[in-house]
Image (spheres, rainbow, N blue to C red):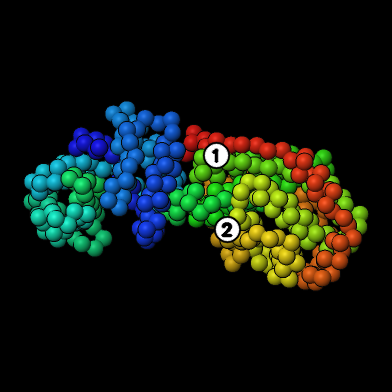
């Protein structure tokens, strides 16, 4: 129960409101994720209320920390620190004035919404009544378009909620409503952004990283672990498979022409990732591939690589240019990690003249003569599995 004395955040969503009969499930998942995000902070309750969520704080709740964590939750369109009061119009009028009187503004508007349609005043009447009271006391001018200040009033379930600040959230869908996927994660710029974009659609991600130790150093693994730590703030717990890929690479290098090796590496990676996906109950694979960015990412090569997968392979960055991906990585917080020096397991052995328009049948014939299954079993058995818990200390 929300009391008029509570300090609260009003949490609004966008897309969930379109889910019809599934809306309850989406709202419950969003509520559960908010509770996970606020774990370790004192707060009173997080619950659904008429098309929005309310997070009630305790007297010792750090509002700034609560706000920052709410802004990491997928599904949250915005969160607003609000005050609660009774619904009679005189109380709403006085509460609105107490909320804005210490703020500086020359123009303002009142933006009222009613979830209780039986309330005796319409939204327009609330706007006029409360707006006139604020105008008389402040001397400010009502301006409906681009005012200095907007005071929001929401009439809902026997209470009124008032706020002036809306803190933008991540949007998307609540994590966990769309199942699981396995992401092939390098420590470069692209694949963390691809993972984030699929997480934002409500998909829980299991991460798989391929490395070539002892031929490479541990930098790529260290970078990937940092990237997973950043992304885990949005899904609260993550699993990372570190796959020692060198046995497969050696097999391919010993029996395939240099021009086709990267394509064969990628096919083997998809096979391994799919085995992990089946173990983890995942329904798709995710890559950071971007059409035409490197030799292995032409449409012909993607076709030759993709055919080994039976699960869908999601490529959310396919049509984006590098500047867009870099900007997204900077917003997410993975860019500075991704530009740290590292040795990529594929680029380490990249040929001088890689094939850019592979024939799928030719690649199949090459692969058939390699007998990769024993090497794939070997690297799967040698994989290291790490788990991560959300760390909000830098949020």
Q: Residue at image x 42%, y 46%?
A: 29
Local crowd size for mark 1, using a 10 Å CA cut-off: few (<14), some (14–19), many (≥20):
some
In percent of the image, x 70 and y 60: which residue is there? 309
Inspect this view and state whether residue 97 appears.
no
Residue at horizontal 80%, vertical 59%? 264
Vertical position of residue 60 compared to residue 287: above or below: above
Measure how far apart labels 2 and 1 are at the Cα level.
25 Å
* The image quarter in which residue 324 lies: bottom right
Q: Considering depth in this image, is 7 or 216 the residue closer to the camera?
A: 7
Residue 27 drawn at (x, y percent): 38, 49
Q: From the image, tell me which residue sits under label 2.
A: 325
Q: Is residue 103 left or right of residue 307?
A: left
Residue under pointer 1: 237
Q: x and y percent of residue 10 in the render?
A: 30, 45
Circle nearer the N terminus (2, 1): 1
Q: Residues within 10 Å of mark 2 (few under 14, many from 20)?
A: many
| Residue 139 image point, x, y percent | 11, 51
> Is residue 274 or residue 363 the one in the foreground?
274
Say above or below: 356 vs 203. below
Q: Is 138 displayed left or right of 7 in the figure?
A: left
């Amino acid at each position: 129960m929300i009391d008029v004395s509570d300090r609260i955040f009003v949490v609004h969503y966008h897309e969930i409101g379109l889910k019809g009969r599934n809306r309850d499930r989406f709202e419950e998942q969003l509520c559960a994720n908010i509770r996970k995000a606020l774990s370790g902070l004192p707060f009173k309750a997080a619950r659904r209320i008429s098309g929005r969520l309310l997070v009630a704080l305790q007297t010792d709740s750090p509002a700034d920390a609560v706000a920052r964590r709410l802004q990491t939750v997928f599904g949250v369109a915005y969160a607003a620190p609000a005050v609660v009061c009774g619904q009679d119009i005189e109380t709403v009028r006085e509460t609105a004035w107490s909320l804005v009187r210490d703020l500086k503004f020359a123009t303002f508007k009142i933006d009222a919404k009613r979830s209780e349609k039986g309330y005796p005043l319409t939204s327009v009447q609330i706007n006029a009544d409360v707006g006139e009271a604020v105008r008389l006391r402040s001397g400010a001018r009502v301006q409906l378009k681009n005012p200095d200040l907007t005071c929001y009033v929401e009439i809902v379930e026997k209470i009124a909620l008032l706020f002036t600040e809306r803190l933008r959230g991540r949007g998307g869908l609540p994590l966990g409503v769309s199942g699981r996927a396995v992401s092939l994660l390098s420590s470069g710029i692209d694949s963390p952004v691809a993972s984030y974009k699929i997480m934002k659609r409500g998909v829980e991600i299991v991460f798989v990283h391929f490395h070539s130790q002892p031929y490479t150093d541990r930098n790529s693994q260290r970078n990937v672990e940092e990237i997973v730590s950043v992304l885990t703030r949005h899904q609260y717990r993550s699993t990372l498979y570190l796959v020692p890929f060198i046995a497969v690479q050696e097999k391919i290098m010993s029996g395939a022409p240099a021009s086709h090796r990267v394509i064969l590496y990628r096919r083997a990676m998809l096979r391994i990732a799919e085995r992990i996906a089946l173990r983890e109950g995942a329904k798709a694979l995710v890559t950071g591939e971007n059409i035409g960015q490197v030799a292995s990412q032409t449409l012909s090569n993607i076709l030759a690589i993709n055919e080994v997968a039976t699960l869908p392979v999601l490529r959310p960055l396919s049509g984006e240019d590098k500047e867009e991906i870099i900007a997204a990585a900077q917003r997410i917080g993975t860019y500075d990690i991704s530009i740290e020096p590292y040795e990529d397991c594929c680029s380490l052995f990249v040929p001088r003249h890689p094939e850019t328009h592979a024939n799928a049948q030719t690649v199949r014939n090459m692969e058939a003569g390699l007998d990769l299954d024993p090497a794939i079993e070997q690297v799967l058995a040698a994989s290291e599995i790490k788990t991560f818990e959300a760390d909000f200390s830098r949020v």
